[in-house]
Image: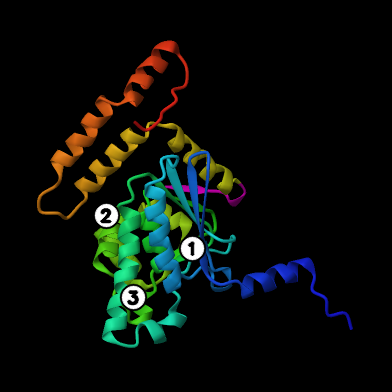
Amino acid sequence: MNTRSTPAQATEERAAASPAAVHVSIENGVGSIVLDNPRKLNAMSLSMWQTLVDVLEKLESDPTLRCVVLIGKGEKAFCVGADISQFEHSHSGEEAIAEYDRITRGALLRLQSFPKPTIAAVSGYCLGAGVALAAACDIRIAASGSRFGIPAAKLGLGYYYAGVKRLADLVGPSRAKQVIFTASQFPAEEMFRMGLVDELVERSQFADRVGEMAATMAANAPLTIAAAKYAIETVFSDASEPDIEGCAAREQACMISQDYAEGRKAFAEKRVPVFKGH
């Protein structure tokens, strides 16, 4: 009997044996963060949450980075949430629960506050914490046929405040209640109508469209984008005193930057500007 695996089987076997991980790469100013746990539809293990924080910290200080794309490994799922198989261990006591929540919430807030533009590229299932990850990004592009949902009500879990607020800011309070109260799965087309998905793209055009948008952002003035992102996040912040001075300082930094001088010069010379981020 021939027991040798076919190439496809060998690939599946390697994927099954591979530990859950988060990978990062940078090309032409665009960083790609890949959630790699395809055996569990890219469910987030505790180590993946921790790695995500580390990756974001390193990317923030990289002067070559202009934009980040967050994507799941493969086409079946962006992310189906937290890896609940770890809950027996990570949620086995009050201290363990508090530590797990601290890490996961910290990662989501770190992603949302990341100063450079972020794109969630959603292909396949996007559930639970996967929705929180997508919502924490600035823009969400979804492939047709993708499905979204928050099954917390079927598990008895509380969906954390910042995630609820972010969802409600994007789709409105009634829609956010519908998503969470029903714990249903919604097609990408409906999430596009609700406002969670910003662009809905045919699967055959998905990768090209994500790359196109990321490249467009990467070519634009990074100080302008950072200032605009900070201002928009300030508008939707629940801080009692919005940081208007911080917004003004970032605006002023753009006005006195070399990039602004380059933008004016390129406009006068009728050429594409080359921005340096300073």
Query: Which residue is under mark 2?
Result: 169
Drawn side of residue 167 relative to residue 187, left or right:
left
User: Can residue 16 be seen here?
Assistant: yes
Which residue lies at the image location 21% right of the left edge and 46% below the top edge? 234
Which residue lies at the image location 40% right of the left edge and 52% below the top edge? 58
Who comes first in sequence, dot 2 or dot 3? 3
State the CA–CA distance, disc 1 to disc 2: 20 Å
Callout in the foreground (2, 3): 3
Scheme of image coloration? rainbow
Callout in the foreground (3, 1): 3
State the CA–CA distance, disc 2 to disc 3: 25 Å
Q: Which mark is residue 147?
A: 1
Drawn side of residue 239 relative to residue 56, left or right:
left
User: Can residue 149 be seen here?
Assistant: no
Query: Which residue is under mark 3?
Result: 100
Label 2 residue SS: helix
Magenta part of the chain = 196-204
Q: What residue type is labelled 2?
A: Asp
